[in-house]
Image (cartoon, grey):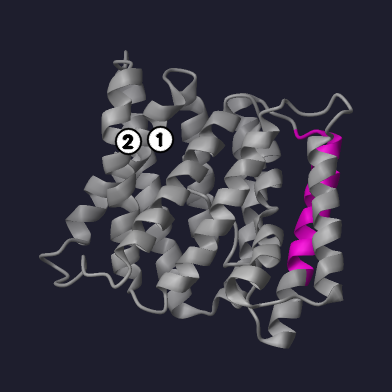
Amino acid sequence: MCGAVATFSCLDTTGKYLIGHMDPLQVVWARYFGAFLLALVFLNPINTPGMMVTRRPWLQIARSALLLLSTALNFFALRYLQLDEALSILFATPFIVAIMSGPLLGEWVGWRRWTAIGVGFFGVLLVARPGFGGLHPAALLSLGSAVCYSLYSISTRFLARTDSSETTLFYTNLVGALAMLPIVAFVWTTPTSLFVISLMVLIGAFGSFGHYLLIRGHRLAPASTLAPFIYTQMVWTSTLGFLTFGDVPHYWTVVGGLIVVASGLYLLNRERKTGTAVTGGGVIPE
């Protein structure tokens, strides 16, 4: 899990760099098309017969579309936000999942977790500081990304009851690659250097390898055990943001981020005690 979130931090850093050289939608295309081609080498219908068979094809497509939209919103937000700022807002995902799990999954939360949710959103507000000369309005894009990823997480749990993780991963990359193929023609900018081309290939590799590590981790341990390690992504993201872009975390980003992480860890602790899993497995909208 630590390796997965470190890889996703590298993906976001690469994406933010590429956005300075091309349209964000072209970056989204590179992420999905590269990931699809690389994953196809190891995960395809020939090596895994029956992999494309799903009992819920429309839910697979809708789930994949939600992740694609979450990724696109995140990349558009990274055009204006620092990596640590965007990630702090995305860490609101477990709280949004907890709210949606009641009406959608019948998993209602008690007053202790409602308190943790409220405190967590307060931490998000400290990061965004709406109306107080805080973040760029692009913070709303990060929040939209978190909402899309929350719905994606819930739909993933529905699909886990009928489809294998290999099938779900294959459709995730396939739908993203096919959806972006006609769009990229309208925003295409021919790369001007071999370095940029290499990064376009690398971002797809980060996507494939990160999700591979994520799946391997969940095969070795329960989601509730792995989820706390997701917050190590803040360390990687802040470090890479400083080394690559010279971004120094703002005081309110640090304070708000710590509140969000603490609230998320409390939610995870309550899940272990009650045997529920309302956080949806973490915050990785890549």
Residue 267 belongs to magenta span = no
Q: Is residue 188 shown to the viewer in this render?
A: no
Of residues 126 and 68, the one nearer the viewer is 68
Res 187 label: none
Q: Is residue 93 shown to the viewer in this render?
A: yes
Residue furthest to the bottom: 274
Q: Position of residue 29 (x, y in %)?
A: 34, 34
Residue type highlighted by circle 2: Met
Is 280 displayed left or right of 196 in the figure?
Answer: right
Residue indicated by mark 1: 28
Q: Residue at x 75, y 77 (%)?
A: 269
Give the number of marks.
2
Quadrant in the rendering for residue 191: top left
- Counting other residues with Cα less than 10 Å from the Cα at mark 2, is it few (<14), some (14-19), or many (20 or more)? some
Q: Tell me the element at label 2.
A: helix
Residue indicated by mark 2: 180
Q: Main secondary structure of the magenta part?
A: helix
Q: Tell me the element at label 1.
A: helix
Segment colored magenta: 249-266
Is 41 displayed left or right of 159 in the figure?
Answer: left
Q: Residue at x 29, y 15 (%)?
A: 190
Quadrant in the rendering for residue 205: top left
Q: CA distance from mark 2 to mark 1?
A: 8 Å
Quadrant in the rendering for residue 110: bottom right
Q: Where is 17 relative to 55, above or below? A: above
